[in-house]
């Protein structure tokens, strides 16, 4: 791969083999015992060098990872195959041996999941396909224009987002060793100062934002045993904020969310405390602080909220 010596305006491409060793945390008190979690990963990525947004974020790396993992109990947990697009940031510009944060979000396929008759022990995952998320921090040990050898530590999560039950999910902590192998004599040079950027006219502008969302989930807890249906969830959010340096948007707002499952459950069970107002008692109001980071044609959106009303 390194001998191809192809170039783009976006910076050098690389291939990155990685080995992760860690431990799967028990999702509930009666979960089956597990041994070491072992993952092998191959990533294809590139160092973004020349675009304005790349200069602003100190030349982040973007790409996609494919991994195969043994969860430490093949009989109950099976194996995991993941496909994870990612972005990797180098937050400190002056280090010659760079430090990275990596965020990855995608999907996983599990060869074994919960089944009432054939696999009742595994209550962590209720379907073969789930969402998957990873957060890792890496420290480079050796860097030149051909390779970047690094070690890391991080957290992995997989769950169905309550769209299929049971959904305790998988959480694991792992240590990692990886090697980015760049196109020959075309790798990035770390530790160099960035070129100055002119002040953008968009900075300091205020904006208003309205968002409507639609989702779905399956009712858990003390619901009727035979009700395994998936029903909709609706969200409307209103916020206002400011654009910072063209590539960051910070906002504050309030959101309203309505759960069809809660409404039907209240009506079915005729709870005295909730039945007089089934719509409002199936609702949720929360306030939030959010930030969107523009990475080329992709926005990375982060939001933190607090419930103000959720009966």
Image (cartoon, rainbow, N blue to C red):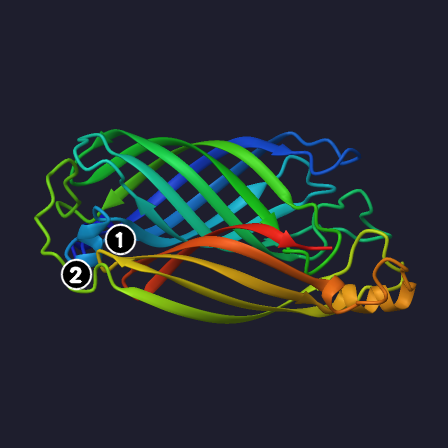
- The image quarter containing residue 233 is bottom right
Q: Which structural element holds mark 1?
A: strand
Work out which residue is located at the far top of the displayed protein and give it.
Answer: 141
Seen in the picture, residue 57 relative to 272 is either above or below; the reply is above
**Residue denoted by label 2:** 8
Can residue 12 be seen here? The reply is no
Q: Residue 66: x and y, percent?
A: 45, 51
Q: Residue 117: x and y, percent?
A: 87, 52
Say left or right for 67 vs 297: right
- The image quarter containing residue 150 is top left
> Alpha-carbon neighbours of circle 2 within 10 Å: few (<14), some, or many (≥20)?
few
Can residue 162 be seen here? The reply is yes
Q: Between 274 and 171, which is closer to the camera in this rendering?
A: 274
**Mark 1 and 2 residues: CB-CB less than 8 Å, in contact?**
yes
Give the total of numbered labels: 2
What residue lies at 51% left-to-right and 49% top-to-bottom?
A: 133
What residue lies at 44% left-to-right and 63% top-to-bottom?
A: 239
Say left or right for 264 vs 251: right
What residue lies at 78% left-to-right and 67% top-to-bottom?
A: 263
What residue lies at 71% left-to-right and 59% top-to-bottom?
A: 164
Which circle's residue, 1 or 2, is located before the other in the chain? 2
Q: Residue 107: x and y, percent?
A: 54, 56
Task: Return the mark for residue 35.
Answer: none
Q: Which structural element holds mark 2?
A: loop
Task: Return the mark for residue 46.
Answer: 1
> Alpha-carbon neighbours of circle 1 within 10 Å: few (<14), some, or many (≥20)?
many
- Alpha-carbon span between mark 1 and mark 2: 10 Å
Q: Between 11 and 298, which is closer to the camera in this rendering?
A: 298
Q: Residue 311: x and y, percent?
A: 74, 55
């Amino acid at each position: 791969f390194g001998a191809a010596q192809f170039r783009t305006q976006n910076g050098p491409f690389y291939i990155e083999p990685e080995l992760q060793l860690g431990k799967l945390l028990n999702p509930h008190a009666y979960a089956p015992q597990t041994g070491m979690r072992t993952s092998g990963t191959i990533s294809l990525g590139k160092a973004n060098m020349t675009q304005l947004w790349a200069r602003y974020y100190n030349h982040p790396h973007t790409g996609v990872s494919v991994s195969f993992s043994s969860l430490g109990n093949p009989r109950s947990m099976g194996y995991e195959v993941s496909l994870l697009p990612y972005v990797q940031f180098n937050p400190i510009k002056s280090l010659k041996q760079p430090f990275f944060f990596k965020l990855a979000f995608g999907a996983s396929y599990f060869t074994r999941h919960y089944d009432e008759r054939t696999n009742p022990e595994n209550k962590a995952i209720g379907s073969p396909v789930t969402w998957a998320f990873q957060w890792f921090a890496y420290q480079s040990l050796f860097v030149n224009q051909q390779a970047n050898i690094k070690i890391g530590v991080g957290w992995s999560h997989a769950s169905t987002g309550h769209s299929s039950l049971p959904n305790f999910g998988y959480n694991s902590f792992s240590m990692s060793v990886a090697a980015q192998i760049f196109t020959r004599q075309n790798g990035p040079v770390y530790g160099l100062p960035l070129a100055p950027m002119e002040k953008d006219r968009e900075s300091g502008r205020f904006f208003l934002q309205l968002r409507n969302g639609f989702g779905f989930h399956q009712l858990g807890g003390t619901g009727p045993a035979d009700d395994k249906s998936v029903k909709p969830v609706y969200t409307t959010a209103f916020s206002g904020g400011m654009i910072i340096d063209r590539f960051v948007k910070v906002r504050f707002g309030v959101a309203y969310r309505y759960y069809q499952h809660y409404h039907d459950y209240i009506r079915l069970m005729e709870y005295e405390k909730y039945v007089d107002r089934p719509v409002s008692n199936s609702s949720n109001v929360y306030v939030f602080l959010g930030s969107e980071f523009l990475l080329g044609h992709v926005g990375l959106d982060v939001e933190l909220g607090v419930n103000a009303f959720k009966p």
